[in-house]
Image (cartoon, rainbow, N blue to C red):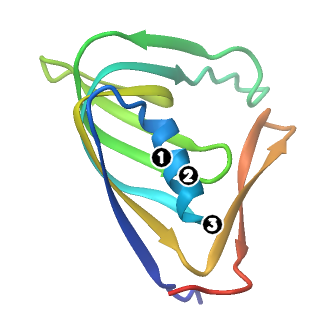
Amino acid sequence: MTMAGPLVCFTLRLGPGVEIQSALQKFVREKGLQAPFVVTCVGSVSAAKLRLAKAIADKPGAGGHEIIDLDQRYEIVSLVGTLNDGTHLHVSLADKNGAVIGGHVMNLTVFTTAEIVIGESCRETYSRVMEDSTGHPQLVVNKRLSQKL
């Protein structure tokens, strides 16, 4: 049986020209968060750099990934991920026609605003360990020794 743990939330508003991923990393460091994640985000971006997965059935993580640069305005329709060392974020963006594109966040620049709610699991800590089978650092979840409420 899994027991639910306490959750603390923080709300952050980022303004025009701010790079979202680095701003989130700075916020997490300043607050000393140990198990942070994105709860929700609404806003818009003027530019984005995304990594798209290149799956190779017999070799997970092998091969290159396509990187795309988007240089127009998009609405953020979803932003999810963990914010510990080695932030891991995925985004879905809608263009002026409503067409959606998404991928692994490498860079997102705010156009008008980004209103972000960050949660922290108060009974866990997050870290990352390089996994040879995927070639990427993977999330490790540990029980927190001291809990804050």
Above or below: residue 56 compared with residue 83: above
Q: Which residue extends farthest right?
A: 132
**Three-letter residue code for mark 3:** Gln
Residue 37 pos. (x, y %): 49, 58
Q: CA distance from mark 1 to mark 3?
A: 13 Å
Compare residues 78 and 24 and report the one nearer the observer. 24
| Side of 138 where 78 appears, left or right | left
Q: How many marks?
A: 3
Q: CA distance from mark 2 to mark 1?
A: 7 Å
Identify the residue position indicated by label 1 in the image: 24
- Identify the image quadrant of the N terminus: bottom right
Contact? badges 2 and 1 (CB < 8 Å) = yes
Mark closest to the chain's N terminus, 2 or 1 = 1
Label 2 Cα neighbours within 10 Å, binned few <14 / some 14-19 / many ≥20? many
Residue 74 pos. (x, y %): 23, 23
Identify the residue position indicated by label 3 in the image: 34
The tag on residue 83 is 2
The image quarter containing residue 39 is bottom left
Q: Which residue extends farthest left?
A: 97
Residue 96 pos. (x, y %): 13, 18
**Residue at 54% over, 47% down:** 26
Mark closest to the chain's N terminus, 3 or 2 = 3
